[in-house]
Amino acid sequence: MTIAERISDSLIDRLSDKTLLQTDSFVDGAWMSGERRFDVSNPADNSVIASVGDVGEAGAHQAVAAAARAFETWKKVSPFQRAALLMKWHKLILENLDDLAAILTTEMGKTLTEAKGEILYGAGFIEWSAEEGKRIMGETLTPPFPNSRGWTLHQPIGVVACITPWNFPNAMITRKCAPALAAGCTMVIKPAPETPLSALALAELAKRAGIPDGVFNVVCGDAQKIGPVLTGSSEVRMIGFTGSTPVGKLLMRQAADGVKRVALELGGNAPFIVMDDADLDAAADGVVASKFRVSGQTCVSANRIIAQPAIADALIEKLKERVDALKPGNGFEAGSDLGPLIHHEAVERVDALVRSARDSGANIIAGGAPLVDELGGAFYAPTLIEGGSPDMDLACFEIFGPVASVYRVESEADIVKLANDTPYGLAAYIYTRDINRVHRLSEALEYGMVGVNAPMVGSFSSPFGGMKESGIGREGGKWGVEEFTELKWVILGGIDQ
Ligand code: ADP
């Protein structure tokens, strides 16, 4: 099949560099097609945009074997040389920003502005990790034995397999593989079946950057077949995953047999707390940024807006103005604020949550219905709800859609209790101008990340990750690099002659 047969004209026409469009897996520096193919669709208009090869178990085995071979040399490459290669990759990503964003918007739906933002965010992890890889340091320790000296080494853990989601098809890959490659590990990535094209474009650029064969592999296909090869292989030393909590638990169980390290970024149920002394305009802007970014499909999206009763009505009024002004639409159209959800099942799921909230007595103040017929894709109206109970499904499950729901709670103790009353513990937000409340609340919240008067918690320089069933491990910053290393202790005896 030629590229034109595998990719729709609408996508090909948008790109200045059409060779970024790859539809086969990338194994040991070469493209591998596989036995069958699967379709990738554009959620904004339901059109099929590409037919991608599924390499299945055989391809996964080959990718792991290639990564294991490549590890033997990559781990010995100087961190400075690894950094130089990562920076070449970084440069190529920035040079191809527009094309990468167009691919991302077409397969995932987020607006072009959001897609460009994601690619810059993703590239930031590469630059940071390239620098940080040069600063992996051990320590000299004092052993309690005579005639001896001791020191520690941080060595690359080995082959890392990462399974990534569709909501950040670029950045969830770079956030894992940049620190891993910088530390000297080699990678097998299995991207989400909804968004393989962004992963394969990254592979094309990695190849052009000169990252050696086998160091960075991407295998596309059936997760149920590929997943067990990755978790079951004795050559894979670590599983990295971003996705749903049930799949994270499954991978952790599978990885347990080989006692592999796991780094899991799972679901969330973020409380967004607005105290009565908050700057309400900043809080309302913060809710919109946290809740409606990527149409609410991020694991750190505000899920429950908890407001003190004294300011709840005023906050709801400000939110309504802002939500009414949001314009859903095709991510390529200028003026679109929100793209579609990832597919029609997601629209159904979000709508079922909203309907059950309405049935249990909540008031729909804005939106509250699918826009599939009006806009021709998997769209859902930006929605604002109030008056529901904190034990309804909308408050207990991760919404993953553009639905903001406000709950009124009076005392600080009850706010903390409600905020923590969930198996999740990823991100929480607090809006207040009282410094004592900042300390009390940020310490009491059982969450891995707390934004105080700040709606964004993720960055390449800070630790991203959750407590409880939201995950294990941290990505980003020096912690993100450390995750991919083993700490080794070396003791030298008999040094006195
Ligand atoms: P979502 O429901 O939002 O798609 P998932 O957790 O199902 O979230 O998907 C995240 C990633 O996990 C995707 O790459 C998907 O293909 C992969 N995945 C799903 N099921 C499995 C599985 N049983 N084993 C390994 N990977 C899986």
Image (spheres, rainbow, N blue to C red):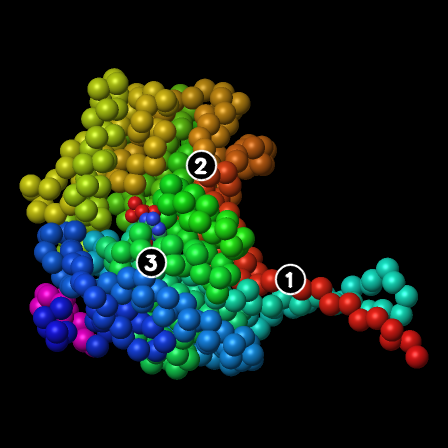
Badge 1 vs badge 2, beta-carbon distance below 8 Å:
no
At a point 31% along the width and 52% down the height, the residue shown is: 224
Residue 235 rendering spot, x and y as whole percentages: 48, 65
Mark 2 highlights which residue?
A: 424
State whether residue 207 appears in this view: yes
Provide the residue designation for mark 1: 487
Q: Residue at x 9, y 46 (%)?
A: 375
The amino acid type, in three-letter code, at marker 2 is: Tyr
Residue hosting label 3: 226
| Residue 246 placement: quadrant | top left
At x 44%, y 79%, the residue is 85
Determine the image quadrant of residue 279. Answer: top left
Q: Position of residue 140 (x, y in %)?
A: 76, 67
Q: Is mark 3 within 8 Å of ligand 1?
A: yes
Q: Is residue 14 magenta?
A: yes
Instruction: Name the amino acid, label 1.
Output: Leu
Residue 93, percent from left and from top: 33, 72
Disc 3 to disc 2, C-alpha distance? 27 Å
N-terminal-most mark, 1 or 2: 2
Give residue 10's position: percent from left, percent from top: 10, 65
451 with respect to 3 (left or right): right
Q: Residue furthest top?
A: 361
Q: Tell me the distance, in whole angstroms, between the alpha carbons under discs 1 and 2.
A: 29 Å
Judge by depth and name the residue closer to the eye, 446 or 187: 187
The residue under label 3 is which amino acid type?
Answer: Ile
Q: Residue at coordinates 31% horizontally, 72% vertically from top-left?
A: 26
Part of the protein shown in magenta: 7-18
Q: Is mark 1 within 8 Å of ligand 1?
A: no
In the depicted view, which residue is nearer to us: 54 or 341?
A: 54
